[in-house]
Amino acid sequence: MRSLLGAAALAAALTSGLGAAVLMPASPPERVDAVPLTEAEVTPAAGTSLQGRVIVLDPGHQLGNGRFPDQVNRPVDAGGFDKPCNTTGTSTRGGFAEATFAWRVAVLVKRRLEDRGAQVLLTRGANRRDQWGPCVDERGRLGNALADGRRADLKLSIHGDGCDGCGAGFHVIAPESRPGWTDDVAEPSLAFAAQVRAALRASGLPFAPYVAGGDGLDVRGDLGTLNWSDVPVAMVELGNMRSRADARRMTSKAGQRRYADALVAAVVATLP
Ligand code: ZN
């Protein structure tokens, strides 16, 4: 792990996380403010080997979630509090589904990581209207216990945001440090999130102006996918699907490749 974070920023992140967790209620905890981080430089060497690495990719939602409301709305433990199993996700104004966007980017990232020798696990095996889930707790746990007794090295949850009238841009979400849940992975997860942010920024993409002070990074304790992970994890909202500018990129093959290339660069830069 390269040292990417200012010590003060990291300490503040961990301290605020612990402080919020002390009063952990039955309902989802409040979001904490984003942590300012120094910009990391992402310049992975071409051909860097990921041999022996195991990476979990979580393409958000499932295309058929809207057809299975009973299953998708069923409460599950999202980290010491209940939330719905999953949601339908958002879409562009033209109707291009977030589930499909996340799936296409995840498949591109998977191929690129496998080309470098990594083993890649997906939290869902298809993008289909006749399927739903899995639930966020299952997504969060995948990779915690591999068949050979190891854990995955990293987990990346891929999404697109849906915020009307909010503008364009991406943001990355790291798990808040919560005792018994994410306190063991919060620090490396924040470092991974910083690499994802840096890689997307290096690709010329703007920070979402409407989230957490507009610095492209948020820290949250209310997401089951992050809370359940025992391996370093980050979630990325690659763009705002309700923004015309982002929607154009997110629906195009070239745009999806651009996102995938940046995400692969972030993984390569994160794994020592
Ligand atoms: Zn989503």
Image (cartoon, rainbow, N blue to C red):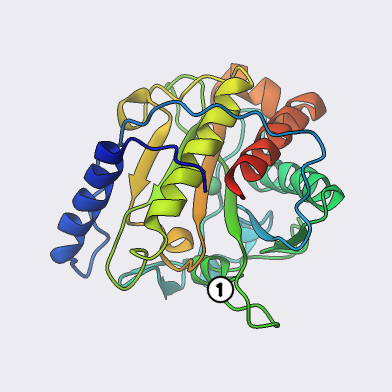
Q: Is residue 15 above or below residue 75?
A: above
The part of the image, by quadrant, that contains residue 76 is bottom left
Q: Position of residue 75 (x, y in %)?
A: 41, 72
Which residue shows up at 45% across the image and 52% down it? 188
Q: Is residue 247 above or below residue 270?
A: above
Which residue shows up at 55% across the image and 37% down it? 196
Residue type at mark 1?
Answer: Asn
Tell which of 54 and 208 is nearer to you: 54
Residue 161 visible in rendering: no
The part of the image, by quadrant, that contains residue 45 is top right
Q: Position of residue 57 (x, y in %)?
A: 66, 55
Q: Secondary structure at mark 1?
A: loop
Count of numbered circles in the view: 1
Q: Is residue 115 above or below residue 39?
A: below
Which residue shows up at 72% across the image and 41% down it? 105
Residue 74 visible in rendering: yes
Which residue shows up at 35% across the image and 45% down it? 219
Q: Is residue 198 left or right of residue 45?
A: left
Badge 1: residue crowd in 10 Å (few <14, some 14–19, many ≥20): some
Tell which of 195 and 211 is nearer to you: 195
Tell which of 183 and 162 is nearer to you: 183
Q: Which residue is mark 1?
A: 144
Q: Is residue 254 left or right of residue 242?
A: right
Outermost residue, right direction?
115
Q: Position of residue 11 (x, y in %)?
A: 25, 46
Q: Position of residue 179 (x, y in %)?
A: 27, 68
The part of the image, by quadrant, that contains residue 109 is top right
Q: Is mark 1 within 8 Å of ligand 1?
A: no
